[in-house]
Amino acid sequence: MSRADGERGDRSSVQSVDRAVTILEILAARGEAGITEIAEEIGVHKSTASRLVSALQRRGLLEQLGDRGKYALSFGIVRLAAATTGRMDLARLGQPTCQALAEIIGETVNLAVSDGEAAINVAQEFGNSSVSSQNWVGRRTPLHATSAGKVLLAHMDEGERRTLLRRRLPRYTEATITEPAALRTELARVVDEGYARSFEELEVGMHAVAVPVWAHDGNVVAALSASGPSYRLPRRRARAVVADMREAARELSAKLGWVEPSGGGSLR
C-alpha cells in the first residue's frame, strides 16, 4: 500500500467515526429515527447509514425498536456513561482529600484510577513545598513504574494482571522494574505492607508513595499518591508520610461507601 492509499484510508476511518458519533447525537436528540432519516441527516446513502447503524448495534450502543425499523440508544450508552460518571464523582470527592493531604505533607498529591494498561490521574493538588506546577490530571502514567500504578496493579484482577505482565515493560530509568518476576515480588509487598513506593523509577530525582482507596464493594477503586524530589522526599520521609496518606485514603473510602472492617481493615 502506498503512503497516499494509507492516508486516504485514515481519512475514511476518521470520517466513519465522525458519522457514527453524529448518529448517536441524532438519536440522543430525537429519541428514535429510521435509516432513511439518519441517512438524510448525515448526508450519506442509505446503505452507508445502515452499515454504521449495524456496527453501533453490534457494540450494544443502539437497539432496534420492534419491527418498526426505528433505532434508539441502548443501555450500552448507559454503561459508558456510568463509567465516566464514576470517575467524575471520584474526582469531585477526591479533590478536597488531595487538597487537605497536600497541606499536611507539603508535597504534590494525586488521585489515580486504572485505565486499562495505564493509570490516569483524576485529581491533583500541589503542596506548599512543591517546586513544580506540572499538571498530571488526565495524563496516563505506566502502572509498573509509578507508586499509584503499582497499587492499582497489585489489586487488579489476577487474569488481567497476568496478561499485562506478559508484555514488555518499558524502562524509564535504571531503577525501573521491568522483569515480571521481580515486579510480582514487588506487588506482593505492596499488598502485604499496604502501600507502594517508586524511588526514581519513572523519573530520575523523583520519589513517590501511594496507598489504596477502597470502594463500597471492598475493591480498590483508586490510588492516592504523594510525590516530590528525592532531596525533599527521601526514602525515610516518604515512608513516614504513609500514615497521613492512609488516614486520608480511609476518609475518602468512607465517602465512597466503604465500611472499615473491625480490627482496622485493609488500609492498616
Image (cartoon, helix red, strand yellow):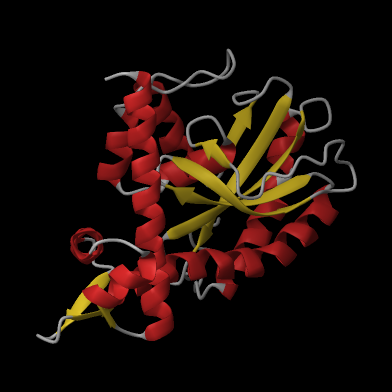
Q: Residue 221, how many percent across, how many down?
A: 47, 59
Indicate whether 144 appears above or below 125. Answer: above
Indicate whether 243 appears above or below 72. Answer: above
The answer to whether 212 appears left or right of 102 in the picture is: left
Q: Which of the image's four quarters has the C terminus?
A: bottom right
Q: Is residue 192 visible?
A: no
Foreground residue among 139 and 40 = 40
Indicate whether 179 appears above or below 188. Answer: above
Choose top left, top right, bottom left or bottom right for residue 153. Answer: top left
Residue at 57 percent across and 70 percent down: it is 89
Residue at 59 percent across and 74 percent down: it is 255
Foreground residue among 117 and 33 = 33
The answer to whether 187 appears left or right of 249 in the picture is: left
The answer to whether 8 appears left or right of 63 in the picture is: right
Choose top left, top right, bottom left or bottom right for residue 249. Answer: bottom right
Q: Residue 196, how many percent across, how many down?
A: 56, 39
Residue at 72 percent across and 58 percent down: it is 98
Q: Residue 219, how many percent across, how many down?
A: 41, 61
Choose top left, top right, bottom left or bottom right for residue 27. Answer: bottom left
Q: Is residue 168 visible?
A: yes
Count how many numbered circles sit on residues in the image.
Answer: 0
Residue at 45 percent across and 72 percent down: it is 216
Residue most toward the right?
128
Residue most toward the left?
67
The answer to whether 179 appears left or right of 208 in the picture is: left
Foreground residue among 42 and 157 = 42
Q: Which of the image's four quarters has the N terminus?
A: top left
